[in-house]
Amino acid sequence: MVRDDPAVAESIVVHAESLYQHEDHLWDVINQLSIPVDSLTDERDQSKVDFETEEMVKAHLFMRIRGFSQNEFADQLSTRSNLIKSVEFDINSLNAASSQQDLSYAWCNFSDDTQEVIEAAAEGIGQAAVEHDVISEAFVPVLPDEEADEDDVQTDKEYQKQKATKLINLARKHVLPE
């Protein structure tokens, strides 16, 4: 089967944009997303895993949109039932939530193309969320420019300064309007 990975990512983003018309929480949008799992490659033995491909894709989408590390997201899952509902984990208690190891194992067993689809979809969904005022721009991670010249490479200190400046400007704009 020939796949068009940009089209798969775009279909996920387009569906999310349509959901933003009547949903005002990111987790509600993630919950209702249709994930074309037939177009994604998950090398895990589905009969032996606790969490299915669609659940893990939704988890990785939410995690990337919000800029969480796997460990941070696993901690959030273990304390927030709305996130568990959002990614549709079929569990009975917060203690059974996906761990960092589960998230990592799934990610490592997604094909490179599937990982690219998830990353592209997360970027598009995040930007659409900002445009529809579902989440603040400060909550969307700043992605490095892939076409940056070697002369334009940012140091960690410059990146932190840029992020802090962006946060301060957003706070001034929204919290302390003139």
Image: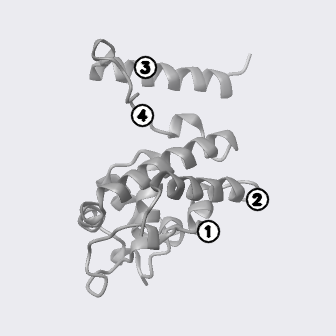
Left or right of 165: which side holds 28? right
Q: Which tag, 1 or 2, sits closer to the chain's start?
A: 2
Residue 59: percent from left, percent from top: 43, 63
Q: Which class describes the residues within 10 Å of circle 4: few (<14), some (14-19), or many (20+)? A: few
Q: Could you give the CA–CA distance between mark 1 and mark 2, rounded to whole angstroms?
A: 11 Å
Query: Which of the 4 image quarters holds residue 71?
Result: bottom left
Q: Could you give the CA–CA distance between mark 2 and mark 3, rounded to whole angstroms?
A: 33 Å
Residue drawn at x 45%, y 73% as measured from the top left: 38
Q: Which class describes the residues within 10 Å of circle 1: few (<14), some (14-19), or many (20+)? A: some
Numbered label attached to residue 162: 3
Residue depth check, mark 3 versus mark 1: number of the one nearer the observer: 1
**Residue beneath disc 2:** 22
152 and 38: which one is in front? 38
Residue 140: percent from left, percent from top: 50, 39
Residue 57: percent from left, percent from top: 42, 64
**Residue beneath disc 4:** 143
Q: Which tag, 2 or 3, sits closer to the chain's start?
A: 2
Q: Amino acid at mark 4?
A: Leu
Q: Is residue 118 shown above or below 36?
A: above
Residue depth check, mark 3 versus mark 4: number of the one nearer the observer: 4
Tell whether label 2 touches label 1 (CB within 8 Å): no
**Residue beneath disc 1:** 32
Q: Is residue 58 shown above or below 64?
A: below
Tell whether label 4 touches label 1 (CB within 8 Å): no
